[in-house]
Image: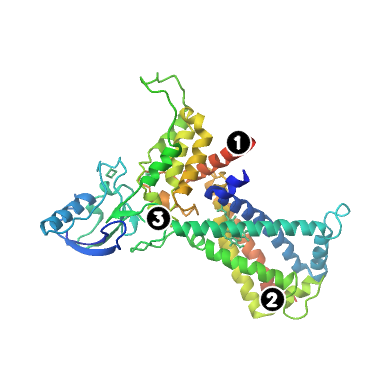
Amino acid sequence: MKLTLRVWRQRNADAEGAMSTYEVDGISSDMSFLEMLDTLNEELILNGEDPVAFDHDCREGICGACSLVINGDAHGPERTTTCQLHMRSFKDGDTIDIEPWRASAFPVIKDLVVDRSAFDRIIQAGGYITAPTGAAPEAHATPVPKPDADFAFEHAECIGCGACVAACPNGAAMLFTSAKVSHLNVLPQGAPERETRVLDMVAQMDEEGFGGCTLTGECATACPKGIPLMSITNMNKEWLRATRKAGKR
Amino acid sequence: MARTMWDSSVGKKTVMAVSGLIMLLYLVVHMFGNLKIFFGAGDFNHYAHWLRTIGEPVMHYEWTLWVIRVVLVVAVVAHAVSAYQLSRRDLRARPNKYVHKKPRASYATRTMRWGGIILALFIVWHILDLTTGTLHPGGFQEGRPYQNVVDTFSTWYGNVIYIVAMLAVGLHVRHGFWSAAQTLGVGSRTRDRALKTVANVLALLLTAGFIAVPVGVMTGVVS
Ligand code: HEM
Ligand code: SF4
Ligand code: FES
């Protein structure tokens, strides 16, 4: 396939960026989207040009490193990560727009790479449990009802990629934060910090300059892991519960 | 606790949901009250008089009405201030638009802010028109709301402003009612269909019920 790519190029965090147009040829429909970009970069390097910087790591849809807004969709047209998106989702002759995640809390570092450390600080604020370390505990020691385990697992699937923020018209991190809160708050292991977790993580989310939720649902549509919008409803419930409890103390 | 509420984006949204629901409850009652206009001047004016005597003899003349007015003003102000502050935060969080644009979200969802502004302006006009009479076309008559309503809807602009605002109410409630359920944490997968249905029914009921009055005047059913 032969494609026209319009890619966001930006030298560094302070530089002005702009869309640059490139032609790539010899793209196989079996290539992943990132392999297609590798092809472009090899050509750029051979021509002595600066290759396009983009984030990636596992390339198997589990680490959350890859990003990219492709034709206006976070992670492109399929419900998967950019690394798991294949060129068969495009046609020969297509023009593809490739942009970085856009949010003030995710500043661009270079080209398509953004700084997502705001997510790390949200996790540091409460996305953990206080468990004794050492040998793995006996599996029956802490029973977890099956529906709770399923609920926790559904939310534990979040890979922290940030597509929810990129897709949200308000640059909100509600879906990411609610996935973490929902995952840990339903489990007995997460119970000791149930209130502080949600209060501190939401406070950190606000502190980082993410927007608020207007329930447009763009986040859940973009999420490669299918974290449901109801996750946000659940976090709101947990937040109100924790605020009421804190008020009584 | 009040501080935590107001300082957090989630808390401020809660203020918006609660104040929105208070206004919504009032609107439903208001809509039914307005429909009494179809039963004649006597019926309608009697209803307006009753509004001032609710709670008697415990309450003095108009006391209950003033309590309702204060609650509503607090709700409108709290709702508008939190809407403004949250919108500011949202716009700051996403200053750079994507080059590749896509139409997003439903119409009702996208028009919450503009719709809200229309509603805010409408509320001011509506009070100056039919409560204080300041902007009323023709002679405003205290205690004769039937004639006042007929006068307002005998002007073309009265009808236009009112009907546009009522369409805005419908759209606002359609997304707002369901949103408030999520904000207050009472939404769930099993309840989602029901909540959306109630939102649509409320939106339709309010818009149709309110618009019936100017249509009644325009068609001469009410005169
Ligand atoms: C003063 C004029 C008003 C303004 C400026 C305004 C503005 C807004 C805005 C910006 C939102 C948030 C939209 C979103 O989340 O996408 C909202 C939500 C809402 N509004 Fe209004 N609105 C006004 C009047 C009303 C009225 C008259 C009602 C009563 C029916 C109402 C009921 C609601 C409800 C129930 C919500 C949902 C709250 C939530 O999302 O949790 N609003 N409003
Ligand atoms: S909720 Fe989904 S879109 Fe958001 S960070 Fe987690 S996996 Fe990515
Ligand atoms: S590179 Fe790891 S999820 Fe895409």
* Residue A194, placed above or below residue B219: above
Visible in this render: residue B188?
no
Place residue B65 in its image quadrant.
Answer: bottom right
Pick whichever, A9 or B198, lies toward us. A9
Q: Is disc 3 surrounded by few (<14), some (14 to 19) or many (20+) residues within 10 Å? A: some
Place residue A96 in its image quadrant.
Answer: bottom left
Q: Is disc 1 surrounded by few (<14), some (14 to 19) or many (20+) residues within 10 Å? A: few
Disc 2 designates what residue?
Answer: B153
Visible in this render: residue B210?
yes
Measuring 83% from the left and 69% from the top, which residue is drawn there? B42
The location of residue A136, given as percent across then percent down, is 36, 21
Disc 3 designates what residue?
Answer: A104
- The three-letter amino acid code for the residue at tag 3 is Ser
- The three-letter amino acid code for the residue at tag 1 is Lys
Give the spatial CA distance, label 1 vs label 3.
33 Å
Measuring 71% from the left and 76% from the top, which residue is drawn there? B135
Of the two numbered discs 2 and 3 in the rendering, the one whose residue sits closer to the viewer: 3
Of the two numbered discs 1 and 3 in the rendering, the one whose residue sits closer to the viewer: 3
* Residue A142, placed above or below residue A113: above
Disc 1 designates what residue?
Answer: A245
